[in-house]
Image (cartoon, rainbow, N blue to C red):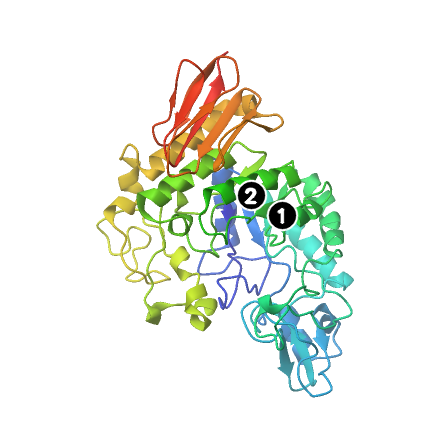
Amino acid sequence: MWVTPFYPSPQRDFGYDVADYCDVAPEYGTLADFDAFTTRAHDLGLRVVIDLVPNHCSSDHPWFLEALADPSSEKRDWFIWKDPAPDGGPPNNWRAIFGGPAWEYEEVSGQFWMHLFLAEQPDLNWEHPGVRAAFRDILRFWLERGVDGFRVDVSHSLVKDQSFADNPLKPGIDVPLEFGDFAAHLDIDQDGVFEVYEEWAPILAEYDAFMIGETWVETERLWEYAREGRLHYSFWFGLMELPWDPVVFAAEVRHAISTVPQGHGWVTGSHDADRAVTRFGGGEEGVERVLALWVAMMGLPGVPFLYQGEELGLENGHVAPEDVVDPVGRRTPEDGRDPCRTPMPWEPGTPQAGFTTAEDAWLRSSPRSDAETASVQWMTPGSALDRTRTLLRVRRDLGDRRLGPVDWQPAPEGTLVYRRGDVVHAANLLDEGVRVAVPEGGWTLRHTTNGGRLLDDGILLLPARSGAILERSR
């Protein structure tokens, strides 16, 4: 289980503005509660991965408060401060991902501090040895409490080019207004970040712990982050911003595994994007597409991550404009993240679908239907939850029979068919059925998402938007 930030925070960005890296926010509980949680998870055979937010902290963090109060303090250099440009404006043209300049003016000192996200999320200066030492201590603090690993937030963004020169603009852009207006970035994806992970890797190894990065870079570049002695994996977001296209999706998945053979953290969605079912067409069609895609990705090297609610086939929730809490959604509603973050629907017949007994949840949204709740789907054969659980069970049961190199099989465009060891994974992303020849030998159909059939002549029939898993007969 990957748990998003639970640290003390003013919650200006859902806990990604950390005010204390070594405690639990009182609204969530105590360190003793966290210890009980990890102990129970381990008793159930689960490992716990927690969010680490090293690029920035909260402007309420004692480190930053000291830096503000005393420009001569050591903590001042734990952050990135620059004098104004000759015209009195920001030091360079860098823009914040959440909008506006990446610089905030501080009147007392007459300098600007840098923030890649909100002004209340000042970036840490990873050139300073004190910052590096502090985070080594933070890692050990949580590892000693039994944490099994970390998801590193914006893992490509810690180190900045020390020239602090302007970012080059895309053709046709004269004045940058958005983060995406630049042709290249000196504020992210710098080679110096690899030194940080190389420092952390031996610490993780002492505890047999796991580290995965939220790394938003081109697929080819991911190899640098996931090399031995750095991160174990990076999330692969190659499909997150693409419109549904079976041929393109299949090609992208093949490209991803050819670029980083040890695999990725495979995802179809996250807490920062519209839900996969919504992006892939909505309704049962969207559910079928997601399930077929998961059949393909869950057999590849790496670790699959299901964002909460994906196992229910949830689409985006509806949040009224007056109830929006996301700072991104308040600025640009079309980019808001609240619709994918609405509370998990557990039980029908209650105002908050079993998420809370309070009158209102943390995010107010329209009620979910009974059919979308976990308890109803649990009792419904063929529901999204039923099919997802079956897929996960088969994947686990196959164990080391599904290990080995990825051997791609001949198949129509828009499909993904490969063999690993004694297992074949086949996914038809198309809106029409296909026939696929399976490798020679005896095979048994172990799982199908949507009515696939294995014929006696070694032909696998895959209906539209379906996946199947075959096991070689012993």
The amino acid type found where label 1 is placed reads Thr
Give left or right: position of 106 versus 311: right
The image quarter in which residue 80 lies: bottom right
Regarding mark 1 in the picture, which secondary structure is present there? helix
The x and y percentages for residue 227 are 71, 42
The amino acid type found where label 2 is placed reads Glu
**Which residue sits furthest left?**
349
Q: Is residue 471 above or below residue 96?
A: above
Estimate how packed mark 1 is, as few (under 14), some (14 to 19) or many (20 or more) residues with alpha carbons within 10 Å: some
Residue shown at 61% from the left, 52% from the top: 215
The x and y percentages for residue 356 are 32, 55
Q: Is residue 208 above or below residue 116?
A: above
Estimate how packed mark 2 is, as few (under 14), some (14 to 19) or many (20 or more) residues with alpha carbons within 10 Å: some
Residue shown at 68% from the left, 56% from the top: 135
Residue on which disc 2 sits: 252
Give left or right: position of 375 versus 45: left
Q: Is residue 346 above or below residue 73?
A: above
Residue on which disc 1 sits: 219
**In the image shown, does 39 or 148 lie closer to the viewer?**
148
Q: Is residue 145 visible?
A: no
Residue shown at 75% from the left, 55% from the top: 191
Q: Is residue 366 visible?
A: yes
The disc, 1 or 2, on the residue closer to the chain's N-terminal end is 1
Disc number lying in front (1 or 2): 2
The x and y percentages for residue 167 are 69, 69
Give left or right: position of 172 versus 325: right
Q: CA distance from mark 1 to mark 2?
A: 9 Å
